[in-house]
Image (cartoon, rainbow, N blue to C red):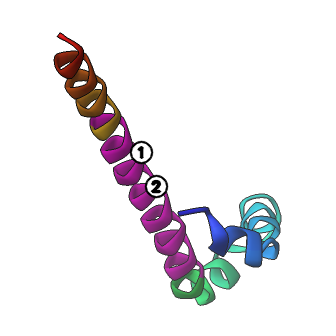
Amino acid sequence: MKRIFLVQHKTMYSILSLGVHELDENTCLAHFDTLKVGIKIILDEKLEEAKKQKKIQEASQKIQLLNQSLKN
């Protein structure tokens, strides 16, 4: 799975950067829940991708071992 959410919501990075550097605490707190949901979605996508890559790696190793055993 690609990291689609952040690509579709490019402005989120700008908003977060602005918040860190320029926005006051009350403004940040007022929009915290909205950005938190977005961050969780991005993290979910990263976790799904990591799980998929691990499965691919494991399958590749097993296929390679199977192929070697069939050649012997």
Vertical order, 56 against 14 (above or below): above
Asked whether residue 38 is drawn in magenta, I would say yes
Q: Quadrant of residue 57?
A: top left
Q: Closer to the camera, 48 or 29?
A: 48
**Local SS, label 2:** helix
Q: Amino acid at mark 1?
A: Gln
Residue shown at the point (61%, 89%) measured from the top left: 30
Q: Is residue 14 left or right of residue 29?
A: right
* Residue shown at 37% from the left, 43% from the top: 56
Question: Which residue extends farthest top?
Answer: 72
The picture places residue 22, in percent across and down from the top left corner, at: 82, 65
Residue 26 located left or right of residue 21: left
Q: Is residue 69 above or below residue 32?
A: above
Q: Residue at x 54, y 67 (%)?
A: 42
Cα gap from disc 1 to disc 2, whole angstroms: 6 Å
Quadrant occupied by the C terminus: top left
Which structural element holds mark 1?
helix
Q: Are marks 1 and 2 in contact (CB under 8 Å)?
A: yes
Relative placement, left or right, of 45 versus 59 is: right
Residue 3 at x, y percent in the picture: 61, 63
Of residues 47 and 72, the one nearer the viewer is 72
Q: Is residue 23 left or right of residue 46?
A: right
Say which amino acid is labelled 2: Glu
Instruction: Characterize the local packing of mark 2: few (<14), some (14-19) or many (20 or more) Cα atoms within 10 angstroms.
Output: some
Q: Which residues are magenta?
A: 35-58
Provide residue 16's location: percent of width, then percent of height.
Answer: 72, 67
Location of mark 1 (residue): 53
Main secondary structure of the magenta stretch: helix
Checking the image for residue 49, the label placed there is: 2
